[in-house]
Image: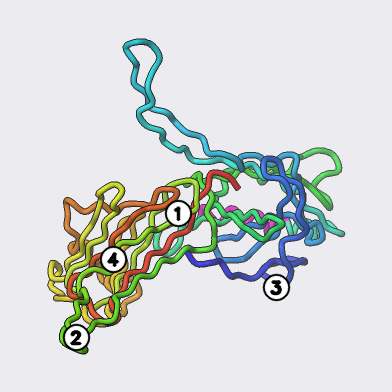
Amino acid sequence: MPLIAAPVVTPPPPPPGSGGGGGTPVPLPEIGFAVASYTDPTGVVWPLTDEAIGWFTLADGVSGLDAAGYELTTDAHPRGGARLRYAQPLPRSIVWPLYVHGETHVEFIGRWRALVTAFTRTLREGSDGRRTPGWLEIERPDGTRRQIAVFYQQGFEKRGVKGSGIVSDAAAISLWCEDPYWRDPVEVSVHREAGELSDFLVPFPTISSSQVLGETVVTNPGDVIVWPKWTITGPASLITVTHEGTGESFSLDPTEVGHGNLLSGEQVTISTDPPAVRYQDGTPNGANWSGALNWPGAVLWGLTPGDNPVTFQLDGSGPGSAVDLTFNPRHETA
């Protein structure tokens, strides 16, 4: 996915504003020194570790940033004990305490309300009927970042003790993550293109393939499997992509949807999670080309951690034929 570029909230509210970063690195449990921020569904960035902005993180209460939880499926072993059959990663819950303050009650309550709206809007349905998560981001002192998609669950309520809620108060926010893994916001891209074709007789008998872009190795630097997006650029009559390590593959035949061969410059994108095939015909979402895949044998496979041997094959390729693969590495911890 692309990097998020958005305005950053600065006091006083209401947001959005513009300017500064997320603050000075502070010690956070489970991860050490880091800067944290939250990007709401509208793209506004809310620093979480900068006291000067009017709120900051109470680091002692932060939890849920380390390894994901798993549900294990086992089979009893006849000689005693059990054998692990399957490990299902579970949704993650993160607790993030915030302390909000202001010079006056009006300033404090304005900041409090703005933060409540920023987090709870993850539960509102958009025009397409879907809910959009926010993104919690942890940035290390060396500049590396990891993000996780979050939905507000509970906890944004005042303490209700004497003296609180006037010019300051604290809340322990619970955030629910449908995908328990953190992602690197820096996208990994792999580009493979057809080589220059040669005349068989000039200057001497030469063979240049018009079918195979070739075998390659795609490295997933993350901790867990990732599900890439493919972009195929014509000319091509049949596209086959194979993971040589597992034998899994899928093929796309444009003639199966009545289009004919991909012409030079025409593109098809294949998403593996969720599965989708779109021909870029100029419409906002593209034409649905799911029927062009070789069902039921097609497997839209993922990339395991480390090196993955892959073969890109484009029948009928020529100058400009290309395969582009993109993904964001995923990690167990922040």
The CA span between labels 3 and 1 is 35 Å
Circle 1 packing at 10 Å, graded few (<14), some (14-19), many (20+), is many
Q: Position of residue 119 (x, y in %)?
A: 60, 54
Circle 2 packing at 10 Å, graded few (<14), some (14-19), many (20+), is few
The residue under the point 24% across, 67% down is 288
Above or below for 96 versus 76: below
Residue 15: say if magenta.
no
The residue labelled by disc 4 is 214
Tag 4 secondary structure: strand
Residue 178 in sight from this viewpoint: no
Circle 3 packing at 10 Å, graded few (<14), some (14-19), many (20+), is some
The residue under the point 44% across, 50% down is 306
Q: Nearer the viewer, mark 2 or mark 1?
A: 2
Q: Which residues are magenta?
A: 112-123
The residue under the point 66% across, 46% down is 156
The CA span between labels 2 and 3 is 63 Å
Contact flag, marks 3 and 4 (Cβ < 8 Å): no
The residue labelled by disc 1 is 220
Above or below for 279 versus 81: below
Q: Amino acid at mark 3?
A: Ser
